[in-house]
Amino acid sequence: MKRGLQALDRDVIACERCERLVAWCRRVAREKKAAFREHEYWGKPVPSFGDHAPELLIVGLAPGAHGANRTGRPFTGDGAGPFLYSALHRAGFASAPESLHRKDGLELVGARITNAVRCAPPGNRPSPDEALACRPFLVREFELCRSTRVILALGAFAWNEVLTVLAERGATLSRPRPRFGHAAEFAAGPEWPVLLGSYHPSQQVTRTGRLTPAMLDRVLARARSLSRAAGRSRG
């Protein structure tokens, strides 16, 4: 499983399927933000980060232009990162409350973080064709993370991408299609991970109080509870 995920990460980093996204990531890395003028940007598709046998798989939308596109690690280097990683630390999924850069020694325990789209898109909005082109990476991630019992989708885009991948892999979706919401849940059956939803921890959401630390803590506690229940039933 570890070698398979490492191979997946290498394929992600080398991907040039989407001309617009490749050009944008490189442009941002070349022009940079004034505050990070002295930083060396990653400027490529961003691989996943975390445990190679995760019980919890966290899926976001896409890397931030001056966050993960700069640091090379999901949810690292922009405003969403401190909010997410501090919550993961409180829940026991992270060894420290901060993610600073790829070589900071941070470890995730029982959790793995990825994005539905692996390149930073202009305006943080990938096109439908770009999402489709990147989807095979998410399919491979799901297939390799066989220990995953809960998938946490951060935002509606990630929620819908996860549902699409589950359906492509043979899961039966309820009708009408499960709707995204904070703390929403969908279980396709005992052989499939439970899907949880949370508002995305972007600064636009957290600064307004739409998503608070307590709200994310409760979702992560629910993820832990569901994972333990699934472990007992499988055992």
Image (cartoon, rainbow, N blue to C red):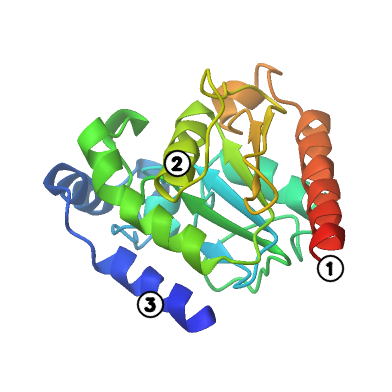
Q: Which of marks 3 and 1 is in front?
A: 1
| Count of residue discs | 3
Q: Residues within 10 Å of mark 2 (few under 14, many from 20)?
A: few
Residue pushed farthest bottom? Answer: 3
Residue 70 visible in the current orientation: no
Corner quadrant of residue 80: top right
Judging by the rendered image, the residue that carries numbered circle 1 is: 235
Q: Are marks 1 and 2 in contact (CB under 8 Å)?
A: no
Helix, strand or loop at disc 3? helix
Residue named by callout 2: 167
Mark number displayed over residue 185? none
Of the numbered discs 3 and 1, the one sitting upstream in the chain is 3
* Quadrant location, the C terminus: bottom right
Residue at figure coordinates x 62%, y 51% from the top left: 192
Asked which secondary structure carries label 1, the reply is loop
Q: Do the residues labelled 2 and 3 touch (CB within 8 Å)?
A: no
Q: At which x and y percent is residue 174?
A: 56, 27
* Amino acid type, callout 1: Gly
Q: Is residue 34 placed above or below 212 in the rendered structure?
A: below
**Kind of residue sitting beneath label 2:** Ala
User: What residue do we see at 42% from left, 38% from top?
Assistant: 164
Please give left or right for residue 142 compared with residue 65 in the image: right
